[in-house]
Amino acid sequence: MVIPDGVDQSRPSPARVYDALLGGKDHYEVDRQVAEALVGILPSMRLVAVQNRAFLGRAVRYLAGEAGVRQFLDVGTGLPTRDNVHDVAQRIAPASRIVYVDNDPVVLAHARALLTSTPEGATDYVDADLRDPAAILERAAGTLDLSEPVALLLVAILHFLPDDDDPHAAVAELMGALAPGSYLVLSHGTPEANPRGVDAADEYTRKAPGTEVTPRPAEEVSRFFDGLVPVDPGLGYITAWRPEGPVPPPDKVGLYGGVARKPS
């Protein structure tokens, strides 16, 4: 794999670790080591990654289909894989417009794979950080009409922001700039399903710079939806949000998630 400029191969990346857990090929030895270590601590980690991706797909299908959303802002995109947001949305609504946001140089190097689109729709990639919502909104406005509803996707990204970065304020700023009728989709790690396993994984990631996480309880995750109207069945474990098959037990997939609408 060609190494993009600015990549430190000695430092793991959340996007590349996630790619390794999903069985992808766009990662380095340090990322594989972290992935394998996490699987050793939490044997269901690969299932977590797969189920998180499945939740994203179900949410996008709901938004593009039943909800009629035609614009998507995916922050913390990660590396291209099967059924990216534009693949799912444009199969249902070919005129959908998608903006991907990430700040990982490897993701940027592979962004061209995210920029395929139907002739009716559009895709774009923005190199930006969730800690700078104003920059995300400014650059996304080149492709999206922010005066019309947008689905903001924050899937397995917010737990990489510690409390000192005030992730609740970042989400509030992004949603505050979006039109009524917009949606928020998020998934977030929690210690509540498997406290002992999550504590052990948390301790490990704090020794692997670049992969540190801040799992949050349901009360803290629900705050991201303040002022929004939950879409049935509301906030809960991601496997319980409109499942399309057997549902693994909560202690195997410790991610809370949900979809909510900005009222008119």
Image: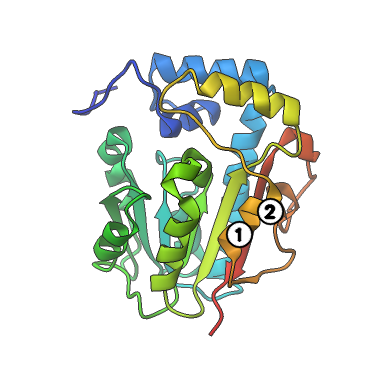
Where does the image place residue 201, in percent across and percent down from the top left? 61, 23
Q: Residue at x 26, y 25 (%)?
A: 7
Of 57 and 218, nearer the camera is 218
Label 2, secondary structure: give it.
helix
Residue at the far left in the pictured view: 5
Residue at the far front in the pictured view: 164
On screen, residue 174 versus residue 64, left or right, reads left
Where does the image place residue 142, in percent across and percent down from the top left? 23, 67
The reply to whether residue 86 is in sight is: no
Of 87 and 200, nearer the camera is 200
Residue 223 got which mark? 1
Which quadrant of the figure has residue 90? bottom left
Q: Say which residue label 2 marks.
A: 219
Task: Give how far apart the Cα atoms at labels 1 and 2 are.
Answer: 7 Å
Q: Is residue 131 above or below residue 62?
A: above
Q: Residue at x 28, y 52 (%)?
A: 126
- Quadrant position of the N terminus in the picture: top left
Of 92 and 211, nearer the camera is 211
Disc 1 and disc 2 in contact, CB within 8 angstroms: yes
Q: Amino acid at mark 1?
A: Arg
